[in-house]
Image: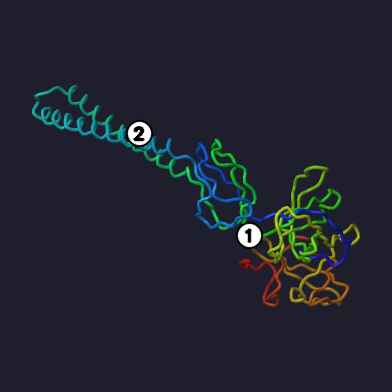
Amino acid sequence: VAERGAGQNRRFPGVIEAVDTSSLSFEVAGNTREILVDVGDRVKAGEVLASLDDTPFRLNVDAAEAEVSRARANLAEKKTDFDRQSTLFKKDWVSKAAFDQAKAAYDSADSQVDYATSKLNLAKRDLDKAVLRAPFDGVIADRQAEPFQEVARGQTIFEIYVEGAMQVALAVPETSIRFISLGTPATVTFPAESVPQQQGRISEVGTVASEANAFTVKVTLTDPPESLRPGMTAEAAMLLGGEENESNFLVPLSAIAPGEESGRGYVFVFDPSTSTVRKTAVVGGGGVRDNRVLIREGIAAGDIIAVAGVSFLRDGQKVKLMAQ
């Protein structure tokens, strides 16, 4: 339940942004050897975007491999000594202390091999992380590094976004935020004449005010055109309730089960805590508009109501939501 049947038409300025964005950075520090893409480039998942000078990382791998070889050689030596001491101990030709000393040296050498192998794996991982790849198909929105530049671990190199999924970020004043609810439809217009008017719905409602006591609200666009780009300005118009018509909502006619009196009926409201439906009396008014009826009392913004199979439901019946 979100679409108002009556109220005040309000307009809010906003900015277009991509629904899915990511800041890309190297997981190791180094000197950038290559920057292969620029702002506006379309990239595929796994495509190499930039790389660091890998000489230090290769040297670390070589050093780690040498350390593993030395540790294994030492392990072989300690194992030979342990086997010899074990044989002599079984024949009572050496003391228990000598046997224990040989075993401790062998165990220590074995642990040293594990430690050296772990260091080698980390060195190989760092070498692999010297190449930055695209995590998904997308478009490069920003580039913040140049070739032969020293970059730190975690320093942002690129901003990337998924093309096609766009939303409008609005700043809604505190006087209006209580009338905003998830699913509320909005009509979005753009100053750019090349971008046609778009339809969308509220997908996020902020709970903490930011600058100027305004709350961030996101409107996801239903079918954004290819000409739409992040950062473009927009304006979203939506019908908001007021003190006198806060309960007025349009719902599908199929959601209404008839009551005994004219203008009264029932809907089945879903309770997510118990996965049951609750038979709820509603009061209508204003007639039917495009197979939707205006409900004046009984439901609130955010309620989930059944819109199919209503005649087969009963109060308290256990149900589960269909996948969106």
Which residue is disc 2 drawn over? 63
Classify mark 1: residues with Cα within 10 Å, few (<14), some (14-19) or many (20+): many
Q: Nearer the viewer, residue 64 or 146?
A: 146
Whether 95 is drawn above or below 258: the answer is above
Classify mark 2: residues with Cα within 10 Å, few (<14), some (14-19) or many (20+): some
Residue at (81%, 58%) from the top-left corner? 235
Left or right of 248? Residue 310 is left
Quadrant of the drawing holding the C terminus: bottom right
Quadrant of the drawing holding the N terminus: bottom right
Q: Nearer the viewer, residue 182 or 165?
A: 165
Residue type highlighted by circle 1: Glu
**Residue 191 x %, y %:** 81, 59
Q: Provide the secondary structure element on which disc 1 rests.
A: loop
Residues at marks 2 and 1 touching, judged by CB atoms closer than 8 Å? no
Q: Provide the secondary structure element on which disc 2 rests.
A: helix
Q: Nearer the viewer, residue 125 or 144?
A: 144
**Residue 274 x %, y %:** 64, 60
Which mark identifies residue 163? 1
Q: Nearer the viewer, residue 102 or 271?
A: 102
Left or right of 293? Residue 129 is left
**Residue 92 x %, y %:** 9, 25
Residue at (50%, 51%) from the top-left corner? 48
- Tell me how far mark 2 sits from mark 1, CA to CA: 43 Å
Whether 109 is drawn above or below 305: the answer is above
**Residue 300 x %, y %:** 79, 61
- The disc, 2 or 1, on the residue closer to the chain's N-terminal end is 2
* Residue farthest right in this picture: 244
Residue at (80%, 63%) from the top-left corner? 193
Res. 53 visible in picture: yes
Residue type highlighted by circle 2: Ala
Left or right of 49? Residue 276 is right
